[in-house]
Image (cartoon, helix red, strand yellow):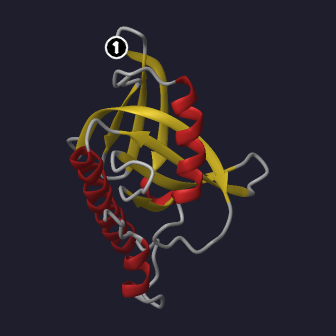
Amino acid sequence: MWQPATERLQVTYLGKVSTTGMQFLSGCTEKPVIELWKKHTLTREDVYPANALLEIRPFQVWLHHLDLKGEATVHMDTFQVARIAYCTADHNVSPNIFAWVYREINDDLSYQMDCHAVECESKLEAKKLAHAMMEAFKKTFHSMKSDGRIHRNSSSEEVSHEFESDDG
């Protein structure tokens, strides 16, 4: 069944970097975001150069890459909400950054944790994305629970906590 987009904003995709650790708490994206921000500011123009459209949906996040005219290209990255470990719009380097940690599964079925970040036009837009992600987490969690993919013997409160975002 088709579901309307939760949030859709033009952003500047800063990129991704691998991150380590299994505990994703407040501040865990700060170091990767600083690294991405430094790379971005070396090539940055003075104007806000939106190069992507970030669309947060109930079970997936779509990152549509834009061409120089601001039109969507055929290249799009898809992220499964259930594999997002953490997200936040609370960064010291810039209040306009929204970041998420994603569990990428490799061909050999091992996985790596990548921190992705986007720069929004404003702090409010970054917060809106964090809120939309929290809503997507809730919908995904409830769907997984009702489908039996999350077993009742695990603490619902504990699993539910994993789906909370830190939006400042």
Name the outermost residue toward the right.
Answer: 108
For residue 167, which quarter of the picture? Answer: bottom left
Question: Residue 63: where, in percent of width, then height?
Answer: 42, 34
Question: Residue 92: where, in percent of width, then height?
Answer: 42, 57
Residue 133 appears left or right of 91? left
- Please report the residue visible at 34 percent of the width from the left and 25 percent of the height from the top: 48
- Quarter placement of the N terminus: top left
- Which kind of residue does numbered mark 1 sit on? Glu
Residue 93 appears left or right of 131? right
In this view of the protein, can residue 115 be seen by the observer?
no
Residue 8 appears left or right of 16? left
Compare residues 16 and 78 and report the one nearer the observer.
Answer: 16
In the displayed structure, would residue 103 be above or below residue 7? Answer: below
In the displayed structure, would residue 83 be above or below residue 40? Answer: below
- Please report the residue visible at 49 percent of the width from the left and 67 percent of the height from the top: 27
Question: Residue 168: where, in percent of width, then height?
Answer: 31, 65
Secondary element at image label 1: loop
**Total number of numbered labels?**
1
- Please report the residue visible at 42 percent of the width from the left and 59 percent of the height from the top: 87
Badge 1: few (under 14), some or many (20 or more) residues near its Cα, within 10 Å? few
In this view of the protein, can residue 49 be seen by the observer?
yes
Compare residues 108 and 42 and report the one nearer the observer.
Answer: 42
Question: Residue 18: where, in percent of width, then height?
Answer: 67, 51
Compare residues 43 and 72 and report the one nearer the observer.
Answer: 43
In the displayed structure, would residue 47 be above or below residue 151? Answer: above
- Please report the residue visible at 47 percent of the width from the left and 91 percent of the height from the top: 153
Q: Which residue is denoted by mark 1 in the rendering?
A: 71
For residue 142, which quarter of the picture? Answer: bottom left
